[in-house]
Amino acid sequence: MDQIATGKFITQKRKKQNLTQEQLAGRLGVSNKTISKWETGKCMPDYSIIELLCKELNTTLPELINGKENEKNIPAYDNKQIVEMIKEIQSLKNTKILFIGFILLIMGGIMLALSQMFGGTDIQDFLSGFMLGISISEMLIGVLFLSLYLAHNKRKK
């Protein structure tokens, strides 16, 4: 699945329907920035909206995923299978965010413990303070990743 090709295909189909990003966004219940991210290949449409997107763009799911019109229009998968694959991919991305958050929290805790072992000379005090700063940063970023994970899961329900 090529996100750039899919994005260009979305742009092409949207323009063919004489729709602006704002109009398409309104029909789908998303922001025009979301449409822009799809069209530039920065992200893919969520599985919960992809069938409606296909309907609005007058295209099929296999064509959208492939980023081009299929002259024969013989899909290798049916729409339900494709939606399930997209759902699984997005679920794996969420799991990755959760995993990174926990790793950062653990690394931050380890660095915090290590920073307390140093001290005495000016250089050791500097290293201790530096490690303390890194540990706090890691833990804050870890909390941010966990917050993103929780916010995304809350939004889906």
Image (cartoon, grey):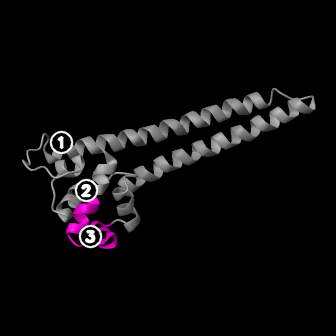
Q: From mark 1 to mark 3, how far is it between C-alphas?
A: 24 Å
Residue 86 falls in image quadrant: top left
- For the C terminus, the image quarter is bottom left
Helix, strand or loop for disc 3: helix
Instruction: Judge whether 59 appears above or below 87 on screen.
Output: below
* Label 1: few (<14), some (14–19) or many (≥20) C-alpha neighbours in 10 Å: few
Identify residue type, mark 3. Arg
Q: Which residue is mark 1?
A: 81
Q: Is residue 11 magenta?
A: yes
Q: Which mark is residue 144?
A: none
Residue 91 picture quarter: top left
Label 1 vs 3, first from the N-terminus: 3
Please tell me which residue is depicted at 17% across the width and 61% down the height of the picture: 55
Locate residue 29: give its quadrant.
Answer: bottom left
Q: Earlier in the sequence, mark 2 or mark 1?
A: 2
Tag nearer the camera, 3 or 2: 2
Visible residue check, residue 157 = no
Residue 147 coordinates in the image, percent (x, y) = 52, 49
The alpha-carbon separation of the residues under discs 3 and 2 comes to 18 Å
Mark 3 — residue? 27
